[in-house]
Amino acid sequence: MTRRFLFVLGSARDEGNSELLARRAAEQLPPDVEQQWIDLTEHPIPDFEDLRHDSDHVRPTEGNLALLLDATLAATDIVIVSPLYWYSLSAQTKRYLDYWSGWLRTPGLDFKATLAGRSLWGVTALAHREEVVADPLIGTLHNSAAYMGMRFGGVLLGNGSKPGDVLNDTEALTRAKTFFTQEAPPARFLYEK
């Protein structure tokens, strides 16, 4: 299968630091690798409603949910691009991941089986010098990948608060040059050996 990257942008700011860093990393992908960029602010989705004990979820056939679902299913590599908000993912990014729960329970979709073996990545900018504060965000993505049987390529971290600040983080820009060249290992929960 030809690699196809889906970049899910979850910032409340256009061309925010996380997006700028993700775009720098994406510039390094070979030209034959397809890229699709979906901005969750431009393609808003409603709050997720958990129906698992009431009824089956129905596959969306139009609108932003259908766009996101189809793009997710078509991707070999899913890149969550979210700034660090209160030590975790942005609300719109978390909402997108919440829909994975519904898609797991959508008859005929085989969502988990389809995503198994594919790769999940993260890119985030944080306004803190100690990168350990991003551990909750990293843990969310890592554990999501482990649950889905995916590979996890890690999270590219950059530092920035004001628009464009991340472009001054030379270490992050250096890491961006090779971020997607590494092999994403199978994700495992920490309690698994």
Image: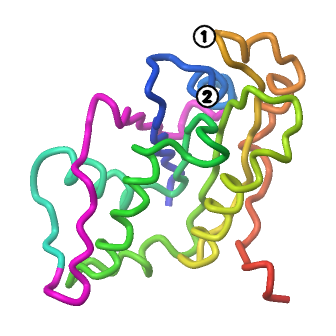
- Label 2 amino acid? Ser
Picture coordinates of residue 39 (x, y %)? 38, 32
User: Is the Cβ of the residue at disc 2 closer than 8 Å to that at disc 1?
Assistant: no
> Which residue is drawn at the image coordinates 64% and 11% (left, top)?
162
Residue designated by label 1: 163
Q: Which residues are magenta?
A: 29-56
Q: Quadrant of the C terminus?
A: bottom right
Query: Against 4, is 37 above or below?
Result: above
Extreme-front residue of the structure: 86
Q: What's under tag 1, amino acid-wise?
A: Pro
Task: Examine the residues drawn in magenta and state their main secondary structure.
Answer: loop
Q: Secondary structure at mark 1?
A: loop
| Picture layout, residue 178 above or below residue 185 | above
What's the CA distance linking mark 2 and mark 1?
Answer: 10 Å
Tag of residue 18: 2
Q: Is residue 152 magenta?
A: no
Image quadrant assignment for residue 156: top right
- Nearest-to-viewer mark from 2 and 1: 1
Q: Is residue 25 left or right of residue 149?
A: right
- Residue 54 versus residue 4: which sits nearer the camera? 54
Q: Kindly state the secondary structure of the residue where label 2 is placed.
A: helix
Relative to residue 116, is residue 21 drawn left or right?
right
- Verify whether residue 38 appears in magenta: yes
Vertical order, 174 against 55 (above or below): above
